[in-house]
Image (cartoon, rainbow, N blue to C red):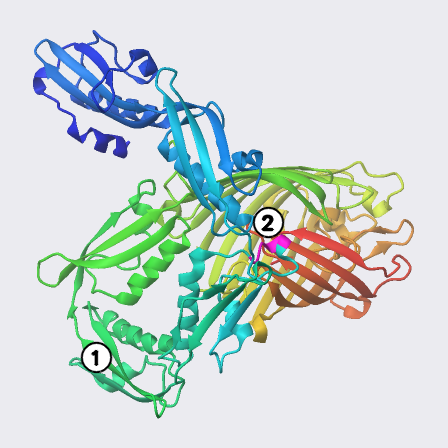
Amino acid sequence: MKKALTILSALIISSAALGEQIKDIRIVNQSGEAYDMSSVAAFTSFKIGEQVPDRETILSSIAVDVNRMRESGRYSYVNARMDVESNGVVLVYTVVSKKRLRSIAIVGGAKSGRKIKKKSELEIGQFADDSTFEIAAAKIKESYRDYRYPFVDVTWTSETNEELGTVDVTFLIDSGPKMSINYIEFEGNDIIDDKKLEKLISQKRKRWWSFITGSGKYKEEVVDSDVYVLKTFYMNNGFLDVQVAEPLLDDSNPKKTRLIFKIDEGQRYRVGKISITGMEEYTEQELRRGIRLRTGDIAALESAEGGSEAIRAYYGNRGYVRTLVRPIYDANAETGIVDITYDITEGTIGYIQGVNIGGNERTLDKVIRRELVIYPGEKYNRSRIKTSENRLQNLNYFEIVTINPDSTGVGDKYDLNVQVKEKATGQFSAGVGFSSVDSLVGYVELSQGNFNWKTWPPIGAGQKFKIRAQLGTERNDLDISFVEPWFMSRQLSFGIDLFHHEANYFSDVYDQENNGFRVTLGKPLSRFTRGSLGYTLEQYNVFDVSSTASQAIQDEAGRRISSNLEYNWTYDSRDRYFNPSRGTKTTITPYVAGGPLGGQTDLYGLRVRSSKYWALIWEMIFNLRGQIESVEAYGGSKANATTYGEGVPIFDRLFLGGSYTLRGFEYREVGPIDPATDDPVGGNSSAYWSAELTYPIWNKIRGAVFYDWGFVNVESWDFDPSDYADDWGIGLRLDLPGFPLNLDYAWPITYDERYMDGSGRFNFLIGHTF
């Protein structure tokens, strides 16, 4: 709407026009020639003879007309104005119509015309203009590059029939030579080896697996960035004089095309004297504290620039605005020593007067303001500004976030200008998945990460909404969730979940259905810790119980209500939520059901789960994760206990085995088994841990070697590990966007030979482990 109103900036409106009739509606082209009124009649809000309403309504209605015409895809150009004449007003719409595409011709090129027409994404009968053909030409060029024709040239011509309103287009293609990059070579790199340099650049050479990865295609667009990456790498390793020339493409033998990078490494410098000049308010000793470089260190440019940043931060955190720090390098190529001087131009102390927010077309101002940790009236603080930027970036609502001070012109007062660029926060996805636990599953999911339940469209208040439906051979699920991260304008999250779950994969001898809702309140306790309190009211239904099932399972048949309260304390210092390389996540969860909470299940328990990551050499990552849990019945559940479980129902008992725990065993296979029927019946205490080492294979593919160990005991709070099971295995980790895959094959080591044969098992999992 704002764009449409901008177009109408030339609209001529006279107060005399108010109350008069619309004399005429004219449709013209840019030369002023008339169009047939019928071509745009469906898009106009007014009729000839209609009384002109108030000015605001006119503006709004004509803006809607312009938007409709644009969105129809029928016009290359749309504008509107209102002319006031002596006996009424005239609405003038200036339009340039697109033509119907009548034919598409492909001339030249190494690929079939039919295939290239499909790549152009043009359709006979669609509306088209010059911009449409330019976009199609770009798509054809990109497709040829995918076919390994990097120097393809695509031009086009068109013929228009004004009488019929049609256009014919012809694409002229010079495909050029077909080639792949077979070799990438580096010349002049005496200290840094080829393998390390080749890993840095975006251009990749052809390999036997290129049919999967697409490597080997020559990408002219990454040449400059590859040169920059190599130069930056060298300078961050002390080669301050390094020169990297634009790579030479040797295609004299198309089957053995080489890409050659010529490098002059120059001297590798170490740090000599470090000095600081220009400071008046602070001593050199105070300012040196943030500088990591020391005399004798490799003179890494990144570390030297980091010293400048540390000094700016020192001043900025004490209220100084616009302090300049310029590193001066005095390098001696003969000795390999570089002296570094940080020359400071001190800024002035400033105070925040106001906060201005811009760029948020959908997101409410308050959603942005509540993430800021610096406020009007406070002294300028650079660290708080950086923290505010990071908090806004972590919302995942914006592509770009910047916060800069701007002088008000009044003494030491500054406004903070918060500028954001919004990105799409809604997502619709559908697909089919498969795992070794729940077999084949089709799903549909609609989510909005910046939801607003009060408006339509429902965007902008920072809430989260998701609805997901799954239909499969072993499970059927419907989940609806809503989260308000700032409940009652406090940093307190409120969430509500509604769910329906049907599971056939828990056992071969019964099925289970869960229906209910969950309400949670959560609050950050510190930088790495968070606490949340959740209440769940849930109805369990154990049905289709086989007549040959264990008596311990038959006793559980029917419906039961559970009213549950749990508290989660979480410590999370991981560097990334998904695929972390370092840090720890630990969750401690005490829970209780029944008693004063009501329901038909009385029990309490404790679950402790932890995962630790270490980054090792050669980009390897070691992960150690584990869980310990116990549950016990009390009250009516204990008193009315049947043949097994000491009153803990089957849906609350503990099991191990499968993709998430012990991967060498079937899902829920590890634990107590009824010897009369061989059915797993679960226990009340369990523990397991897994050690896993992953290593890079190619791009988003990692290999894995792992060991799993665990046990399940019948009685509550019994952690005797004597009846344990364990396994080892190998796997692949494919980090595909929105579709992470874990492929594992594991072999049991210690197992109960009465029920298992010790053969290996394949596990296929879509998603991430905790």
Q: Amino acid at mark 1?
A: Asp
Report the quarter where the C terminus lies: bottom right
- In primary-sequence order, the first of circles 1 and 2 is 1
As drawn, which residue projects farthest toward the top? Answer: 49
On the image, the x and y values in percent for residue 594 come to: 63, 47
Q: Residues within 10 Å of mark 2 (few under 14, many from 20)?
A: few
Relative to 536, does residue 191 appear above or below in the rendering? below
Distance from disc 1 to disc 2, alpha carbons, whole Å, reads 50 Å
**Which residue shows up at 66% across the image and 60% down it?**
208
Please provide the residue range marked out in magenta: 211-216
On the image, the x and y values in percent for residue 648 come to: 73, 51
On the image, the x and y values in percent for residue 317 come to: 26, 70
**Which residue shows up at 65% across the image and 38% down it?**
442
Residue linked to disc 2? 739
Quarter where residue 14 is shown: top left
Q: Give the secondary structure at mark 1.
A: strand
Q: Is residue 764 magenta?
A: no
The front one of 701 and 518 is 701
Q: Amino acid at mark 2?
A: Phe
Q: Decide if residue 88 is on the left or right side of residue 229.
A: left
Relative to 99, does residue 368 appear above or below in the rendering? below
The front one of 581 and 141 is 141
Relative to 743, does residue 612 appear above or below in the rendering? below
Q: Decide if residue 658 is on the left or right side of residue 314.
A: right
Question: Is residue 373 at least partly visible in the picture?
Answer: yes
Residue linked to disc 1? 343
